[in-house]
Image (spheres, rainbow, N blue to C red):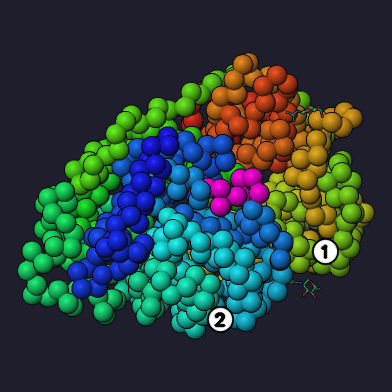
């Protein structure tokens, strides 16, 4: 494992030892259309990995596999909201230790293309922006709104000083830094904002850092996403026409290669790119950069499992490498949206992203080499030498089998534990943002103002429920209200009956919105068109309670009413000998959230699919003591509640909307 790092150090040492060698530099050569590293022509073949989606104990394993695949660089996003949970409060510890992650990349001899945002998309909650930005409800995100710029600048003043000494020019392994992300796809098209970011990045990183942008290869996207002073790159997948996409990139680089190379002979370009090792260079316009070459795609709850064939990915990669292009494969290793970190898209409807971010990538969600990885490695071997040595094998998985759970309590019976500070009193509903709850769940409680002898509509206005509301009357589960779905239930009851609605944030939009994605009850809940009032609003700190040992360490509760509605279930299991990675299936369960030993493994939703199992990294499990499972089931548990631990994932059970409710 030390060898690649050693090789890098030796190479660096040798360069310093030669008096004529150029100083460490990484630059764009507009004359010769290529990157130059220490003066020599250089091309990267890179892969994306997101440290926030991989448990820290697995970082080295995944990076080593990427190195052994023949990559010479990795592309890394920094999610702002992962590191600044509250304004001015920073977290760079444990899984969030981005510097430790960057140290590992350097140790393994990988270069880094860093994408610090501030917006990253990445199908990550709110595209990486902190939800607390929405405390100022009229803020215009990703624009030159002074409130947004002030927050961005304070963040960049914390992050970028950690990055500067790691730039290639300063002895580190970061060769380039992306500013914003696909800004041309955002409605605002605010050049003052991009100019401001450019100024901040320059001021904090220095004049030598290679700064770039990434946009889709459509003229409109490139128009609003690019700026003089930022090298414009594009992103596109294997089903795009490589020539056309790179042609679009060229059209927005006025100083760029396209203009200067008109009429220039092929030999001139080969002078920069090197020779034979690049294979058959036939393309007209090197060097080009595809910053996101899609190896697969994400999954949405309720959608089909996405896949792209290895052969197609290999073919497109070959085409681009033949042209001499620089390529980053997105994703090389996708990983997992643990806890509440998955984002959502807006495509006519709100579409939340699944917990798995497997992405059908060359390294699976659990970090195992796939057929696609070997196909890619074979392509790379035709253009540059592969590192000597074997590809590390898949890590063993273990089927721990069946673990019985029992109901601990209905959620409504443990509000004192989950909201120790007590509820907030409000005439009308308040959003998550208004009560400063970023993720998870908030409970809204009121009483029926009058007798309702005949079924009457309980309804939310359009876009009033973000994103799901689980409705209880007199603590009995009535059904679920859903964003862009069912927004009315019919209820009966008596004056004073307790009405509770548990609101779930399914992930803020990461892409495609021209509005801020507030959560909770955004409008009035009405009974027979008349707004309900006098609410008690409980911000639920479920994760804090579970991290402190609840409910395993607490006294048993009487298990409450039936099987339906939001409730906690618990169980334990032992890991014999070694804590292997495993996958957990939810037979007969509906929808909810899973924790093991206090670690939030994310949302499960087998009723909607396509994902049927959650990935449980072995590093979450403990040997020699019971592993504590906590499940928050939201709609309905099976008659015999148990979980099934398998040695392989089930990501592909495609259902149609008509079957969601029929189950
Ligand atoms: C790609 O686009 C170019 C230019 O429009 C065209 O000449 C070429 O035939 C296209 N290639 C494919 C495979 O469609
Ligand atoms: C998902 O399952 C369906 C039905 O079994 C199958 O046709 C499809 O090829 C599978 N898709 C993937 C990506 O495995
Ligand atoms: C913003 O979105 C709304 C609906 O989602 C649409 O009607 C409107 O045209 C959009 N505005 C812009 C500037 O894109
Ligand atoms: C809720 O209803 C009250 C009373 O009709 C009204 O004043 C208020 O604006 C409503 N709130 C929203 C968000 O529509
Ligand atoms: C599980 O919960 C028990 C009871 O609170 C506690 O003693 C034990 O340390 C927990 N186990 C783990 C692995 O966290």
Q: Which residue position holds label 2?
A: 144
What quarter of the picture does the C terminus occupy?
Answer: top right
Q: Is residue 491 left or right of residue 27?
A: right
Q: Earlier in the sequence, mark 1 or mark 2?
A: 2
Q: Secondary structure at mark 2?
A: loop
The residue lying toward the viewer, choosing from 44 and 543, is 44
Magenta region, residue range: 93-101
Closer to viewer: mark 1 or mark 2: 2
Q: Which residue position holds label 1?
A: 532
What quarter of the picture does the N terminus occupy?
Answer: top left
Location of residue 366 in the rendering, given as x and y in whole percent from the top left corner: 48, 34
Mark 1 is surrounded, within 10 Å at the Cα level, by few (under 14), some (14 to 19) or many (20 or more) other residues, namely some
Asked if the magenta segment contains residue 97, the reply would be: yes
The residue lying toward the viewer, choosing from 253 and 413, is 253
The residue lying toward the viewer, choosing from 198 and 106, is 106
Residue contact between numbered discs 1 and 2, judged by CB atoms under 8 Å: no
Q: Is residue 12 visible?
A: yes
Residue at the spot 79% in from the left edge and 49% down from the top edge: 541
In the depicted structure, whether residue 598 falls above or below residue 523 = above
Q: Is residue 565 visible?
A: no
Location of residue 399 in the rendering, given as x and y in whole percent from the top left corner: 55, 20
Location of residue 630 in the rendering, given as x and y in whole percent from the top left corner: 73, 33
Q: Secondary structure at mark 1?
A: loop
């Amino acid at each position: 494992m030390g060898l690649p790092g050693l090789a890098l150090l030796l190479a660096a040492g040798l360069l310093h030892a030669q008096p004529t060698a150029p100083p460490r530099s990484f630059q764009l050569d507009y004359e010769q259309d290529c990157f130059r590293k220490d003066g020599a022509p250089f091309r990267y073949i890179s892969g994306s990995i997101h440290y926030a989606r991989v448990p820290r104990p697995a970082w080295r394993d995944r990076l080593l596999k990427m190195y052994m695949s023949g990559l010479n660089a990795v592309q890394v996003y920094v999610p702002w909201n992962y590191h600044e949970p509250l304004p001015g409060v920073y977290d760079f510890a444990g899984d969030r230790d981005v510097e430790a992650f960057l140290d590992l990349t350097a140790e393994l001899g990988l270069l880094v293309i860093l994408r610090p945002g501030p917006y990253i998309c990445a199908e990550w909650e709110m595209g990486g922006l902190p939800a607390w930005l929405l405390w100022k409800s009229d803020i215009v995100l990703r624009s030159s709104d002074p409130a947004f710029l002030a927050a961005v600048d304070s963040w960049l003043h914390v992050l970028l000083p950690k990055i500067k000494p790691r730039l290639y020019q300063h002895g580190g392994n970061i060769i380039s830094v992306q500013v914003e992300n696909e800004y041309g796809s955002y409605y605002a098209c605010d050049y003052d904002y991009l100019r401001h970011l450019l100024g901040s990045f320059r001021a904090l990183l220095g004049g030598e850092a290679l700064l770039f942008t990434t946009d889709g290869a459509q003229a409109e996207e490139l128009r609003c996403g690019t700026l003089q002073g930022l090298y414009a790159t594009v992103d596109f997948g294997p089903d795009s026409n490589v020539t056309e996409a790179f042609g679009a990139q060229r059209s927005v680089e006025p100083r760029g290669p396209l203009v200067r190379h008109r009429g220039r002979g092929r030999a001139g370009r080969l002078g920069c790119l090197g020779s034979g090792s690049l294979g058959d260079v036939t393309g007209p316009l090197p060097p080009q950069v595809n910053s996101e070459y899609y190896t697969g795609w994400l999954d949405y709850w309720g959608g089909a499992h996405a896949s792209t064939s290895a052969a197609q990915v290999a073919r497109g990669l070959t085409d681009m490498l033949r042209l001499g292009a620089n390529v980053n494969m997105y994703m090389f290793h996708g990983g997992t949206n643990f806890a509440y970190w998955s984002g959502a898209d807006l495509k006519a409807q709100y579409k939340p992203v699944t917990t798995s971010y497997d992405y059908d990538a060359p390294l699976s969600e659990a970090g195992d080499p796939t057929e696609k990885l070997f196909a890619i490695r074979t392509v790379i071997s035709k253009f540059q030498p592969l590192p000597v040595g074997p590809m590390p094998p898949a890590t063993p998985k273990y089927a721990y089998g069946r673990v019985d759970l029992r109901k601990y309590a209905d959620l409504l019976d443990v509000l004192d534990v989950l909201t120790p500070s007590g509820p907030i009193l409000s005439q009308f509903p308040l959003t998550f943002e208004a009560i400063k709850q970023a993720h998870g769940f908030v409970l809204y409680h009121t009483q029926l103002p009058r007798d309702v002898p005949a079924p009457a509509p309980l309804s939310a206005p359009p876009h009033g429920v973000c994103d799901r509301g689980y409705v209880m009357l007199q603590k009995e589960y009535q059904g679920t209200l859903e964003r862009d779905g069912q927004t009315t239930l019919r209820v009966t009851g008596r004056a004073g009956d307790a009405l509770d609605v548990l609101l779930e944030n399914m992930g803020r939009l990461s892409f495609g919105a021209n509005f801020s994605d507030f959560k909770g009850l955004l409008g009035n809940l009405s009974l027979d068109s008349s707004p309900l009032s006098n609410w008690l609003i409980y911000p639920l700190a479920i994760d804090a309670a579970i991290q402190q040992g609840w409910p395993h360490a607490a006294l048993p509760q009487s298990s409450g009413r039936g099987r339906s509605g939001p409730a906690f279930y618990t169980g334990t299991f032992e890991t014999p000998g070694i804590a292997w990675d495993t996958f957990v299936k939810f037979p007969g369960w509906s929808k909810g959230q899973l924790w093991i030993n206090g670690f939030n493994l994310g949302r499960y939703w087998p009723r909607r699919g396509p994902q049927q199992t959650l990935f449980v990294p072995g590093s979450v499990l403990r040997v020699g003591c019971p592993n504590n499972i906590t499940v928050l089931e939201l709609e309905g548990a099976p008659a015999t509640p148990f979980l099934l631990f398998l040695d392989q994932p089930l990501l592909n059970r495609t259902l149609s909307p008509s079957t969601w409710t029929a189950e």
